[in-house]
Image: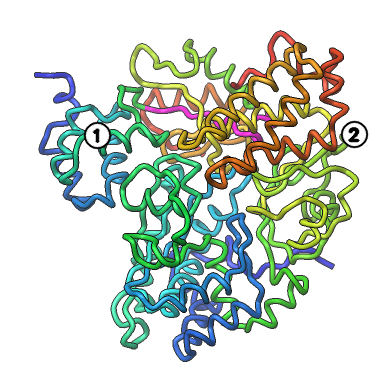
């Protein structure tokens, strides 16, 4: 079986499309849901094809959307995206130090994925948490006032698969 | 006397955000109840009297915008709430969405009633997935309680609100780009005219207002435009949610009446609390990355649309990033320019290429390789972008640079001469987060 079929089968993709509503306006929501369900934070070309078919659009329209928005990826990433904000308020709050903490803790550079495919480190534009900068966003959660100890603890918690830190 | 004025933020942290019952206990939905007994034109007139201006950043008079749409006779009309809060340093819409979503829903519903719209859309940025969930829950509760959905409050009027997601694109905060994104396309801005009031969502007449703008509507209807205006200055009605961040003691969201000074905002104990012990403010950045920087000589300016404009400043989104003397202006502007370089949609050349060139020039300054000719080129580019870019993003991308070139020129010159006054540049490590 092809790789992408291990992650999402056609019926799963079609189910997501049905749940979100098979109309063009829901394209962003559909692709975000597929990306989340993939477990690898990406949208495979085949899944994009199924979306195009279901919405009655050429594949190029789906790819226009996939490649325009920063939250989408067409290549597999880690299960957890560690997104460090590098917009001005966080930069002033020394996000550079946080970058260093994460790269050292995980042994990867920004933009890379750990060998166990658990974490991808990347930058994000402002996530609206400038009052608690520097911050990292993981899924829906934003962790602020980061220190080295907190970074270690966050990674530990996600490794153990129980992301319920505050 | 307190400098805070909680009209919109009165419920923050005091009620369960999605509880209709608790919202009603604090006076919620009295604006809507009053509105359905008024004519649409009466409501528009109250918004005009209130002198409410768009809270997303552009500051366009909301009453005038409503009148333009009202005078257009095509239907159906659509109501769209712009919750694509992507302007770095801005996090006040997030607070409204998560702490008092029903106020936004009430405002959008009053707008729906004014324009006899059946459908409203709120476009919430993808990064705010948690807030999307809270908002959807609030919509469902409002429908269940009869304040939204079919036959609102027993009237003939029916109105639905759809919660829609973005997926990470700052440019979608531009209203026409937002509508393209809402239609399931890439969020590139549209050519205007036609204006969105004529040809908007699905080619229909459309109202697009910011979250905070909508949140003001219930209050304006409830207390009347004149009383609302009275909270602010004669030209800037009401209050503003401001977002303090950067090197300031008390970062956060505060609601202030228009008219208090920038000094109050940055230094008052109840607000910013100053830059902290032994620190000195060097400059501050107003209204988000697209806004101008302000300097110490401007601290006594009143925070309102007119007074700030007279000083070359602006309210913008309400963001106020405070920067102390440990911040290097070159390093700061590199971060700002990198943001625009990343967020430029690439549609027009001045924005796509101009930001790259500005970044490359600033980098030369930070590496001690810049010459006087580079300074002149930087100046030229900062004049070019606002004049030639296609949409607001490119037009505003060099605003901070322009203001800093004017007021902190000596710091640019110092870099040419080989010294960084803040001691940030020329170090081996550099900034490290780019």
**Residue corresponding to mark 2:** B278
**Is A90 contained in the magenta span?**
yes
**Chain that bears disc 1:** A
The residue at the point 49 percent across, 66 percent down is B104
In magenta segment, residue B275 = no
Give me the disc on residue B403: none
Q: Secondary structure at mark 2?
A: loop
Crowd around label 2: few <14 · some 14–19 · many ≥20 (10 Å): few
- Asked if residue B131 can be seen in this view, the reply is no
**Residue A146 or residue B321, whichever sits in front:** B321
Residue ID at (54%, 70%): B65
Residue projecting furthest to the top: B428
Q: Which residue is mark 1?
A: A60
In-front residue for pair B88/B26: B88
Residue A65's image quarter? top left
For the residue pair B406 and A51, the one nearer the viewer reads as B406
Which dot, 1 or 2, sits closer to the camera?
1
Residue A91 placement, left or right of B217: right
Region of the chain picked out in magenta, as a range:
A80-94
- In the shown orientation, is residue B286 left or right of residue A95? right
Residues at circles 1 and 2 in contact by the CB criterion of under 8 Å: no
Q: Residue B223 at x, y = what percent? A: 63, 83
Q: Chain of mark 2?
A: B
Q: Secondary structure at mark 1?
A: helix
Is residue B33 visible in this depiction of the protein? yes
Q: Is residue B151 found left or right of B254 in the rendered image? A: left
The percent coordinates of residue B150 (x first, y second) are: 28, 78
Image quadrant where one finds the N terminus of chain B: bottom right
């Amino acid at each position: 079986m092809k790789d992408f079929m291990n992650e999402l089968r056609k019926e799963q993709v079609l189910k997501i499309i049905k749940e979100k509503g098979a109309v063009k306006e829901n394209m962003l929501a559909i692709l975000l849901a597929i990306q989340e369900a993939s477990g690898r934070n990406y949208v495979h070309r085949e899944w994009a094809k199924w979306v195009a078919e279901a919405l009655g659009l050429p594949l190029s329209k789906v790819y226009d959307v996939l490649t325009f928005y920063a939250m989408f990826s067409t290549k597999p990433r880690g299960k957890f995206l560690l997104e460090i904000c590098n917009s001005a308020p966080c930069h002033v709050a020394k996000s550079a130090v946080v970058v260093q903490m994460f790269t050292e803790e995980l042994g990867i550079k920004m933009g890379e994925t750990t060998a166990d495919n658990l974490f991808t480190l990347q930058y994000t534009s402002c996530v609206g948490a400038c009052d608690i900068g520097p911050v990292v966003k993981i899924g829906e959660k934003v962790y602020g006032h980061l220190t080295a100890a907190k970074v270690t603890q966050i990674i530990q918690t996600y490794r153990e698969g129980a992301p319920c830190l505050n | 006397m307190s400098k805070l004025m909680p009209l919109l933020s009165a419920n923050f942290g005091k009620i369960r955000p999605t509880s209709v019952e608790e919202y009603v206990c604090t006076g919620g939905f009295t604006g809507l109840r009053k509105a359905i007994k008024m004519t649409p034109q009466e409501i528009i007139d109250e918004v005009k009297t209130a002198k409410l201006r768009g809270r997303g950043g552009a500051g366009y008079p909301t009453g005038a915008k409503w009148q333009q749409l009202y005078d257009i006779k095509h239907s159906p009309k659509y109501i769209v709430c712009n919750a694509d809060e992507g302007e770095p340093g801005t996090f006040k819409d997030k607070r409204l969405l998560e702490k008092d979503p029903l106020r936004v829903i009430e405002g959008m519903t009053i707008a729906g009633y004014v324009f006899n719209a059946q459908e409203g859309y709120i476009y919430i940025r993808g990064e705010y997935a948690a807030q999307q969930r809270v908002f959807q829950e609030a919509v469902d509760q409002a429908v269940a309680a009869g304040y939204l959905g079919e036959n609102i409050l027993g009237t003939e009027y029916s109105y639905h609100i759809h919660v829609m997601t973005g997926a990470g694109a700052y440019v979608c905060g531009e209203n026409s780009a937002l509508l393209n994104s809402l239609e399931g396309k890439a969020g590139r801005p549209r050519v205007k005219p036609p204006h969105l009031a004529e040809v908007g969502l699905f080619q229909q007449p459309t109202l697009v207002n910011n979250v905070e703008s909508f949140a003001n509507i219930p209050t304006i209807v409830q207390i009347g435009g004149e009383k609302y205006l009275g909270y602010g200055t004669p030209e800037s009605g009401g209050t503003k949610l401001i977002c303090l961040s950067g090197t300031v003691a008390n970062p956060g969201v505060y609601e202030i009446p228009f008219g208090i000074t920038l000094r109050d905002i940055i230094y008052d104990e109840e607000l910013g609390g100053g830059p902290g012990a032994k620190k000195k403010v060097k400059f501050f950045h107003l209204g988000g990355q697209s806004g101008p920087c302000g300097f110490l000589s401007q601290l006594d300016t009143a925070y309102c649309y007119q007074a700030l404009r007279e000083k070359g400043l602006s309210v913008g989104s309400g963001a106020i990033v405070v920067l102390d003397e440990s911040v290097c202006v070159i390093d700061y502007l590199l971060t700002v320019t990198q943001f625009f370089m990343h967020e430029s949609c690439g549609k027009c050349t001045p924005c796509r290429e101009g930001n790259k060139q500005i970044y490359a020039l600033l980098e030369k300054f930070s590496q001690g390789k810049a010459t006087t000719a580079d300074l002149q080129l930087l100046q030229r580019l900062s004049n070019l972008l606002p004049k030639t870019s296609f949409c607001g993003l490119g037009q505003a991308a060099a605003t901070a640079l322009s203001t800093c070139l004017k007021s902190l020129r000596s710091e640019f010159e110092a870099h040419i001469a080989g010294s960084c006054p803040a001691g940030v540049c020329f170090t081996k490590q550099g900034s490290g987060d780019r």
